[in-house]
Image: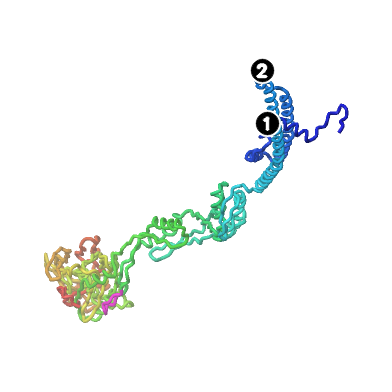
């Protein structure tokens, strides 16, 4: 094949191979053409897929292109080197010409060896090229796989495959693995979780404002009926709490329910716990309840308003009492005592506060009380009440007089005196009139005997006086007669005259006193019922005459209705006496315990009062000598008749007892009172104290 002038021969592919095969190839740089499988992924892992693809291609192309160029340079160098003798070979030719043939032969051998060696190198080089060419597809495959791996990795990264996950338990009990960020996003919401209830209202899915509105709408304006009653010994008294106000904690409860199981961070452990709990809410809801506080002002003032008006009412005690008495059967009707109570107002106030503090706003509060016992109980009456004393006196057979006595007894009998109360004979018996059942009987008026309404009732007052003294009751007022009465011991009488003279006594015991009197079989009976004397004791009155004076001179008074010289005794003579009365105590065995002076009574001496007639036959009047009782024959002009029964010069009425604590005083000269009605002792019979025979 001709080559054109000036045209270098185109080496054939084979010549190139041959040419290069003669050149030893150093494969020290061949490692640059190989990509380590362990290094490639590391290098690529730091680049994005686009960068990886671009860089990898450039590097591979450079390696492929640069390798032959480098090899050609090596071939050229080999050619130039092969035309020269190496220093070692030159030195070996110094052995002379004799050795030239051998040198030639060695040289020829050496050349032959070099040629062989060149052929081997060329073959080795050819094999190296083939090897490098065979690595390219492999590297491409590796790169492709790496790229696919990186793509998959990128895809998985983009879809969050490599993000942290947590294992959660769903509402149905199954377990799932979910990403942390998904779990956080699912439960970090501004609404209540399903299964959250407040006051029975499902607030799941509601916002805070929606839940607060729903809960508030369900709350009653007045959740409690504040009804408080004070119990005072079984009686109930309401307290006015209509101004009470209520305040709910709905806002606090809604906020608390909202925070339930709500995560505070994206910590996996916390998220897992919160997520699981929220899932369980769907199965087992959590209930929240609102509460309210009660604002009540003025508790003390309100309690005082109720109890203060009751203090006196409850503090008052009432003794057991005899409400009725049957004089005939001697039976009593007793009403039970009433206890008193001192109210502890401060204790009641504290009781109401304690009720409210216990979250109870309706109820009954017992008011603390201190018992105030009565002085007299029903039991005490049954044990200690009974007949204390009795006294009786004999009467005359005068019908009118006995009628008056019986009538006075009826007015008195059954009288009940409360402790501290006084009895007044004139008040109880009243005015002695026909209309009230009284009749005329002998009385002493102005110091002599006369007829008057109610005559004889002084025997009733005297009989009662003795019974009162024996009952140890306090005599307030007592007056003795003008002279001693023969139906009682001397000094133990008590006269009355309405309204001037009265007989009064006081119930000085802590029990009631009942006075019972009646007239039967010409006898006056008086009984005193009350608190019995201790240990069966009883009292008797004893009279001692300590002084006596003779009767006074006769008194003569003119009676112009009687014939001259005729006489009539108006009053018998009475000697003067002073009697000292003793109160003697005996025990149940009739032994004297003590003796005390009770009082002293004095009676003045009286002469006989005689009426002398002065009416002459001719209608004239004789003259009376009041000292001797003689009349003269001398006549005088008739003058109006003077009642011989009247006293010319009345004196002041007798004194009465002023000091109830002392024995009653007696009048010294009751006959000087013209208004004093004194019964005729001769009409009374010879009654006397029955010496504790308790005559009935």
Quarter of the view holding residue 7: top right
Question: Badge 1: how crowded within 10 Å, few (<14), some, or many (20+)?
Answer: few
* Mark 2 vs 1: CB contact within 8 A: no
User: Which residue lies at the image location 54% right of the left edge and 58% below the top edge?
Assistant: 286
Q: Nearer the viewer, mark 2 or mark 1?
A: 2
* Vertical placement of residue 231 versus 299, above or below: below
Q: Earlier in the sequence, mark 2 or mark 1?
A: 1
Task: Quadrant for the N terminus, please.
Answer: top right
Counting the numbered discs, the total is 2
* Vertical placement of residue 347 versus 152, above or below: below
Q: Which disc number belongs to residue 26?
A: 1
Relative side of 151 to 309, left or right: right
Residue sitting nearer the eye, 168 or 492: 168
Residue 534 visible? The answer is yes
Quarter of the view holding residue 570: bottom left
Quarter of the view holding residue 653: bottom left
Residue 645 visible? The answer is no
In the image, residue 637 lies at what x, y percent? 25, 72
Residue sitting nearer the eye, 272 or 211: 272
Relative side of 178 to 418, left or right: right
Relative side of 49 to 457, left or right: right
Residue sitting nearer the eye, 238 or 373: 238
In the image, residue 368 lies at what x, y percent? 37, 59
In the image, residue 615 lies at what x, y percent? 22, 76
Which residue position holds label 2? 96
Q: Secondary structure at mark 2?
A: loop
Does the magenta portion include 184? no
User: Which residue lies at the image location 26% right of the left edge and 70% below the top edge?
Assistant: 381
Which segment is the magenta one? 325-333
């Amino acid at each position: 094949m001709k080559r054109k002038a000036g045209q270098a021969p185109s080496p054939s592919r084979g010549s190139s191979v041959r040419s290069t095969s003669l050149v030893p190839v150093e494969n020290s740089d061949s490692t640059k053409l190989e990509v380590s499988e362990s290094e490639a992924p590391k290098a690529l892992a730091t680049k994005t897929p686009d960068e990886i693809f671009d860089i990898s291609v450039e590097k591979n192309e450079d390696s492929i292109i640069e390798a032959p160029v480098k090899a050609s340079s090596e071939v050229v160098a080999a050619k130039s080197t092969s035309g020269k003798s190496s220093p070692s070979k030159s030195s070996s030719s110094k052995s002379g010409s004799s050795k030239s043939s051998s040198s030639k032969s060695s040289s020829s051998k050496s050349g032959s060896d070099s040629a062989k060696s060149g052929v081997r190198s060329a073959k080795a080089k050819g094999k190296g090229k083939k090897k490098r060419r065979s690595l390219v597809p492999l590297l491409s495959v590796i790169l492709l796989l790496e790229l696919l791996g990186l793509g998959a990795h990128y895809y998985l990264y983009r879809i969050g495959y490599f993000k942290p996950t947590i294992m959660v338990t769903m509402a149905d009990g199954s377990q799932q693995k979910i990403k942390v960020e998904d779990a956080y996003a699912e439960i970090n919401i501004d609404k209540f979780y399903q299964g959250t209830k407040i006051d029975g209202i499902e607030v799941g899915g509601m916002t805070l404002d929606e839940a607060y509105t729903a809960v508030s709408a369900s709350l009653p304006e007045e959740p409690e009926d504040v009804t408080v009653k004070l119990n005072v010994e079984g009686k109930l008294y309401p307290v006015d709490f209509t101004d009470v106000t209520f305040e709910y904690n709905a806002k606090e409860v809604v906020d608390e329910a909202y925070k339930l199981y709500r995560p505070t961070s994206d910590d996996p452990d916390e998220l897992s716990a919160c997520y699981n709990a929220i899932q369980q809410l769907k199965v087992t809801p959590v209930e929240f309840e609102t509460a309210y506080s009660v604002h009540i002002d003025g508790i003390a003032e309100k309690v005082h308003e109720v109890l203060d008006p009751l203090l006196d009412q409850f503090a008052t005690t009432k003794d057991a009492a005899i409400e009725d008495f049957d004089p005939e059967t001697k039976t009593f009707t007793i009403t039970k005592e009433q206890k008193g109570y001192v109210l502890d107002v401060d204790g009641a106030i504290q009781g109401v506060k304690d009720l409210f503090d216990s979250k109870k706003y309706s109820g009954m509060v017992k008011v603390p009380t201190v018992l105030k016992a009565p002085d007299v109980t029903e039991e005490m009456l049954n044990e200690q009440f009974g007949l204390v004393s009795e006294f009786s006196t004999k009467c005359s057979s005068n019908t009118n007089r006995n009628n008056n006595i019986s009538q006075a007894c009826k007015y008195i009998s059954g009288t009940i005196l409360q402790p501290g109360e006084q009895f007044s004979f004139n008040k109880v018996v009243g005015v002695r009139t026909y209309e009230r059942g009284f009749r005329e009987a002998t009385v002493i008026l102005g110091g002599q005997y006369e007829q008057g309404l109610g005559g004889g009732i002084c025997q009733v007052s005297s009989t009662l006086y003795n019974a009162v003294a024996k009952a140890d009751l306090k005599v307030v007022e007592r007056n003795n007669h003008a002279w001693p009465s023969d139906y009682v011991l001397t000094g133990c009488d008590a006269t009355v005259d309405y309204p001037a003279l009265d007989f009064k006594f006081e119930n000085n015991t802590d029990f009631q006193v009942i006075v019972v009197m009646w007239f039967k079989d010409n006898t006056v009976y008086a009984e005193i019922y009350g608190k019995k004397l201790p240990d069966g004791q009883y009292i008797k009155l004893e009279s001692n005459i300590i002084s006596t004076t003779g009767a006074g001179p006769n008194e003569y008074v003119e009676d112009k209705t009687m014939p001259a010289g005729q006489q009539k005794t108006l009053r018998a003579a009475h000697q003067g006496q002073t009697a000292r009365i003793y109160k003697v105590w005996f025990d149940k065995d009739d032994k004297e315990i003590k003796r005390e002076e009770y009082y002293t009574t004095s009676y003045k001496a009286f002469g006989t009062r005689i009426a002398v007639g002065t009416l002459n036959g001719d209608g004239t009047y004789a003259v009376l000598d009041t000292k001797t009782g003689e009349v003269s024959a001398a006549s005088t002009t008739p003058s109006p008749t003077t009642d011989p029964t009247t006293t010319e010069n009345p004196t002041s009425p007798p004194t009465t007892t002023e000091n109830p604590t002392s024995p009653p005083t007696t009048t010294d000269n009751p006959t000087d009172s013209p208004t004093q009605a004194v019964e005729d002792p001769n009409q009374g019979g010879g009654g006397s104290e029955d010496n504790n025979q308790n005559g009935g």
